[in-house]
Amino acid sequence: MKTFYVTTPIYYLNGDPHIGHTYTTVAADTMARYKKLRGYDVKFLTGSDEHGQKVERAAAEAGVTPQEFVDGLAATFKEIWQIMDCEYDFYQRTTSPAHVSSIKKIFKKLYDQGDIYKGSYEGLYCTPCETFYTDKQLEDGNCPDCKRPVSKISEECYFFRMSKYQDQLIKHFDENPDFLLPLSRRNEMLNNFIKPGLEDLCVSRTSFKWGIPVDFDPGHVIYVWIDALPNYATALGFCSDDDSDYKKYWPADLHLMAKEIVRFHAIIWPCILFALGEPLPKQVFGHGWLQYEGKKMGKSLGNAICPKALVAKYGVDAIRYFLLREFTFGPDGNFTQAALVNRYNADLANDLGNLLSRTVGMIDKYFGGVLPDLSESTDFDGDLIQTAKTMLGKVEANMDKLAFSDALNEIWNVIRRTNKYIDETAPWVLAKDESKRAQLATVLYNLVEVLRIVSIVIAPVMPNTPAIIREQLNITSGTEWENAGDFGLSPRVVKVTKGAAAFPRFEKE
Ligand code: MSP
């Protein structure tokens, strides 16, 4: 069986999760579900990045030990993933003994083979970003990422010989045009960072304690990114006694993240893997940032963007749908309450919700809840059936390139086409004419079939809605992924059960 291994970043545990974190995790979960439905043996990793000065400071501010601090937040993140229906296979924590032991081995191996060496470093350090910058990289003297002041630091440290791997990395980019996407990020990395020259990287710190110690040199802790990046491999047992998952699932098929950490994944991580003689992930994808009502997300926005509150109000499938439909996966996006309510009302309440309730309602009203085995075509069937049958290929083509919004749009094109088919065929007119019973039954049967197909293809994004559709229409077969390419699979006799509105409308606040 073909395998598929997808990852999110492991999130820093220095604050509560917000909808920005949720964006990456929902996208990864959607890909995991999609690949599973297509028959892959899938593994999905998320987790938490629990070491470093940022965490040490946040714990001190909270008056607890760093371990207590990260234990609490790891539980909060896991709760959010449960609420978001993100079903990961691995939750990797960098404080877990197995990860710590593997990282120590990796560090020692690189040291023994001369890829890590001791030197001293003088540089400009941004503590919140845990990154050193050169003068040139600063913006108005501040960190180019978070725009906060940097401080001059001089310390003895270990270096990773990254410069040695520059040519190999350029060759890898050249030979693998899809290694880093979207294209804009690939160009940025190649032209602004890789081609100008890779410098050796300082990979240990002596200024704080909360990290994995360098066993052979007490006082040094391993740089948080060298601790974090290999998590994707250590979670599979790399450098442990049981590396069977690693053998089976590595290299990862897809590392997902937002743009600010692409540099670490597309430069440092590949160089580490080159040094270890291990294969590189097949693809790194850096999507854009979500803002909230035009503002950068962070602690100050608090509850407004708490995924828990949003799900409590709109339901998990609606939030997952909105995240992946509203924003093109790649550029930045602006999350607004108005856009959420508009999208919810238009696509979910009106288009999908109405199609379901009208279908069930009409079968109930015109046939007492049981669609009989009668059939006679109408002039409008051909186009509807053709549109529905050709959707699957388009959805797959878009999902395969992470174009979630376009994939969903293809599905909604069919849903909207079907609502138009109801207007065209006017079942309420057919119902008045006893000689049109067979046509009426056909029209309603076609609606059931579209909803069966829709219930299959929305499942990766909306894991709970398929069951609602199938329950009301009593669909128990023809629900495999590939069945979405066939029309007419449901038995002709359909017994419906009226249910509550799947997506009740929201009034704008
Ligand atoms: N700990 C590192 C990652 C190490 S991976 C080996 C880190 N963590 S983080 O908590 O800051 O999370 C960064 C990731 O969270 C982003 O790359 C992105 O995937 C997600 N997002 C956080 N805020 C976001 C937005 N506002 N918008 C979109 N994604 C966001 O960096």
Image (cartoon, helix red, strand yellow):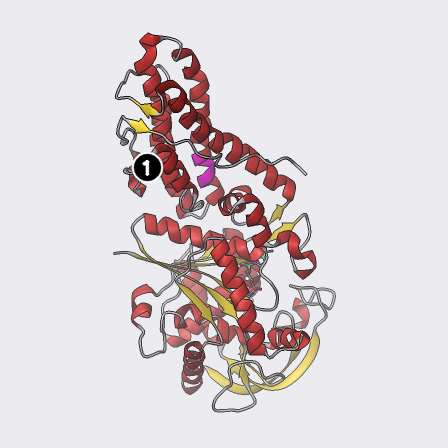
Split into 4 quadrants, where in the image is the C terminus?
top right
Q: Residue at x 55, y 42 (%)?
A: 326
**Placement of 505 over or under 293, stated as above or below:** above
> Which secondary structure dominates the residues rendered in magenta?
helix
**Placement of 370 over or under 440, stated as above or below:** below
* Residue in front for this viewpoint, 122 or 128: 128
Dot 1, how many residues are within 10 Å of its Cα: few (below 14), some (14-19), or many (20+)?
A: many
Split into 4 quadrants, where in the image is the N terminus?
bottom left
**Placement of 36 over or under 214, stated as above or below:** above
* Residue in front for this viewpoint, 223 or 457: 457
Horizontal side, residue 417 vs residue 188: left or right: left
How far across and down, in percent of the image, does residue 375 sit?
A: 27, 18
How far across and down, in percent of the image, does residue 54 sit?
A: 62, 73
Horizontal side, residue 315 vs residue 370: left or right: right
Q: Residue at x 50, y 54 (%)?
A: 83
How far across and down, in percent of the image, does residue 497 sit?
A: 38, 32
Q: Residue furthest front?
A: 368
**Placement of 60 over or under 489, stated as above or below:** below
* Residue in front for this viewpoint, 251 or 439: 439
Q: Is residue 62 magenta?
A: no
Residue where numbered disc 1 is placed: 484
What residue type is disc 1 on? Ala
Q: Give the residues in magenta.
A: 407-411
Q: For ligand 1, which image quadrant applies?
A: bottom right
Q: Residue furthest right?
A: 140
Q: Residue at x 40, y 9 (%)?
A: 432
* Residue in front for this viewpoint, 5 or 253: 5
